[in-house]
Amino acid sequence: MAARHYDLNGVTLAVAADRPEAAGFLDFVLSPLAIDPTEKPDCRIAIETRGTLPPAARGLLQFEGALPESLPAQLVRDGDLRTLDAPGHYQAESLRGSDFVRVLVAPGSDRWLTGTLAFWLLDELLVGKGRIFLHAACLARPAGDAILIFAASGTGKTTTALALARNGYGLMGDDVALLEFRDGRPWVWGLPRPINLHRRTAAMLSWIDPILRPWRGEEQSVPFDKLATCIDRAAAKARPCGAMVMLQPPNPEGHRAAPMARTEAMVQAAADNLRVAPGGLDEDGELAFDALARLIAAVPVLQLEVGPDPDSLRPDILESAGVTAR
């Protein structure tokens, strides 16, 4: 068996597989957190290649359709057992409260391991360790803490995060952040996953051109380490949360930041971060809802409208609006 080990800010993860290329399937997002093997990891992922996958799981259907990577799949729950099934490609099982998840993958389907499945597996394991996944950009401040930027996909979160990282903050991640509480205080960190960059963002931030490949569509994936030549990056370590920023529609008159009503922030953050299964929120959804509510109650909450020139956006506008060291 081949294996890879990672330190997820205090939670050790071991991935074992029957092939080295499968064991390293999380390197695309976790390679900066790789560590030497540990005898007693906190949680484990096992990957096994199967010529024939088991029949689709039965139970309460929580999702059926195409994943973001256009792969048909379904998520089924049977009591505490959840199964993410992409017919003909993989089947993953997670038992609530367990530190172990298993993935059966069909030959030739390794490329699908780095899609939705990778983040589903991490979410399944880390929620039991008190870590909550958030759809948010995470940036480090010089003061030593961090801010979170919330926005729905395609509404400028990556552009905003890159501009702030170019002008004084450090980027930890543009799309996925993790939240935990230590002694009642929120701590956050971002996953350094590759950035999916849109042509529109590249057009507004011309300084990123030297690291881009020729365009073959409207988006391209940029490895996180390549960003080091044009922005400040920050290590993916947990930091106290200094503020949460809710990105609003662009402002044609210029950048604007101001305090935001916490109830409105909760509505916006919940709409983009909570998965509502048939019958309402499941246990994990309730944990995420509670974590968001605690976060919003604990830190300054700002709304940010970005003007027509994102490249001129600087952290000063957030600092003066109420970001404080935690």
Image (cartoon, rainbow, N blue to C red):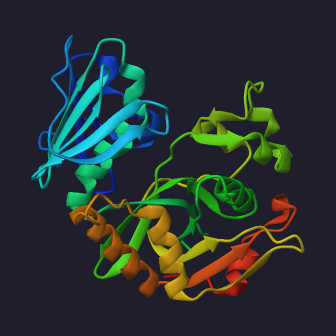
**In the image, residue 181 above or below residue 176:** below
Question: Looking at the image, which is closer to me, 7 or 127?
Answer: 127
Q: Nearer the viewer, residue 305 or 242?
A: 305
> Count the marks: how many?
0
Q: Pick out the residue farthest to the right.
A: 253
> At 50% from the left edge and 86% from the top edge, which residue is drawn?
263
Query: How far across and down, in percent of the image, does residue 92 sit?
Result: 23, 34
Q: Within the image, what quadrant is residue 82 found in?
A: top left
Q: Residue placed at 82% from the left, 49% from the top?
A: 205
Residue 240 appears at what percent x and percent y?
Answer: 44, 73
Examine the image and state in which quarter residue 133 appears.
bottom left
Tell me: 229 left or right of 135. Answer: right
Taking the image as shown, residue 190 lies to the left or right of residue 43, namely right
Q: Residue at x 74, y 58 (%)?
A: 163
- Using the rendered image of the protein, determine whether residue 299 is visible from the camera's viewpoint: yes
Which quadrant would the N terminus be assigned to in this image?
Answer: top left
Task: Answer whether residue 7 is visible to the viewer in this image.
Answer: no
Q: Nearer the viewer, residue 53 or 205?
A: 53
Question: From the viewer's perspective, is residue 302 above or below residue 20?
Answer: below
Where residue 59 appears, x then y in whole percent?
A: 15, 44
Quadrant of residue 30 within the rendered picture? top left
Q: What residue lies at 37% left-to-right and 44% top-to-bottom?
A: 119
- Position of residue 144 measured from the top left corner of the image (x, y, whole percent): 53, 71
